[in-house]
Image (cartoon, rainbow, N blue to C red):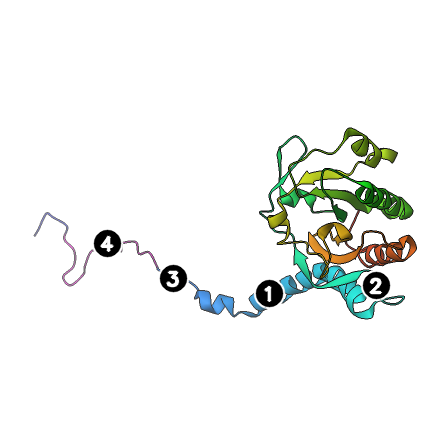
Amino acid sequence: MSGSNSSAPGSAASSPEPLSFAVHSLPDPRAIAGSPNQRAGRWKMLMVLAICAAPVIASYFTFYVVKPSGSAYGELMAPTVDMPADLPLTDLQGRAVPADSLRGQWLLAVVQPADCGPACERQLYVQRQLREMLGKERARVDKLWLIPDDGTPREKVLEAVGQKGVEVNVLHVPADRLAAWLRPAPGKALSDHFYVVDPMGRWMLRAPADPDPKKFKADLDKLLKASAGWDKPGR
């Protein structure tokens, strides 16, 4: 007779099993990339980009290919010429002006020396009048006078070009650097033309310095109408 309680032979005391951490395999990134959801997302992104770009593409197709209401009076640049990002510009006080600051508006540009003679004064006058002729669309166009030398225009000239409350943006730029962007027609000088630049900084049209105002305005009207879907007044 035993005074102790003992387990029955062959029986084992139950003990808790150790905790186990099940390691589940991670999804294969290649499988995710090729999943229907991923492909659908890519297509949606491409569609959004296409929709955003469509107005710009359509406007340039209309102007360059369809050419509504006849051909251009000025000479179209094909391809257009991008404004160099490092174009060295300075204002009349000698302060550096970033080239990118000229983007965001249509530019009606002239290239004339600081010692502005009669032909220069005439072109600046025509520049002002052309902008005024655009009526309600004139807010989408800035006047630009690029000076390829280190001189300072006479005060009377600056006062004259600033009439009607809209001053010309007058900037100095080295002639050799400017030649990487704007170019005259063969046998002509830079000062012999107007240069039309789009809001993305692309030079796209060249016209005579003493143009037929109505015909040149018709070119500007076409450009502004073709870009109305994506270009708005103000920088």
Q: Earlier in the sequence, mark 2 or mark 1?
A: 1
Left or right side of 190 for 137: right
CA–CA distance in space, label 4 to label 1: 55 Å
| Mark 3 element type | loop
Q: Which mark is residue 42?
A: 1
Which circle's residue, 4 or 1, is located before the other in the chain? 4
User: Measuring 89% from the left and 58% from the top, which residue is drawn there?
Assistant: 215
Real-space Cα separation, disc 4 to disc 3, in angstroms: 27 Å
Vertical position of residue 104 compared to residue 79: above or below: above
Q: How many marks?
A: 4
Q: Give the amino acid type for the residue marked by disc 2 in the picture.
A: Ala
- Which comes sooner in the sequence, label 2 or label 3? 3
- Camera-near label (2 vs 3) is 2
Q: Which residue is mark 2?
A: 72
The C terminus, quarter of image: top right
Q: Residue drawn at (80%, 64%), measured in percent from left and top?
A: 63
Query: Quick check: can you spot residue 235?
Result: no
Foreground label between 3 and 1: 1
- Looking at this view, is 63 or 188 the one in front? 188
Q: Disc 4 designates what residue?
A: 15
**How far apart in space, not on screen, are marks 2 and 1 (Cα)?**
40 Å
Tell me whether circle 4 and circle 1 mark residues in contact (CB < 8 Å).
Answer: no
- State the image coordinates of residue 193 (x, y, percent, origin top left): 77, 53
Q: Is residue 90 above or below residue 50?
A: above
Alpha carbons under labels 3 and 1: distance apart: 29 Å
Q: Amino acid at mark 3?
A: His
**Circle 3 sits on which residue?**
24
Q: Which residues are magenta?
A: 6-22
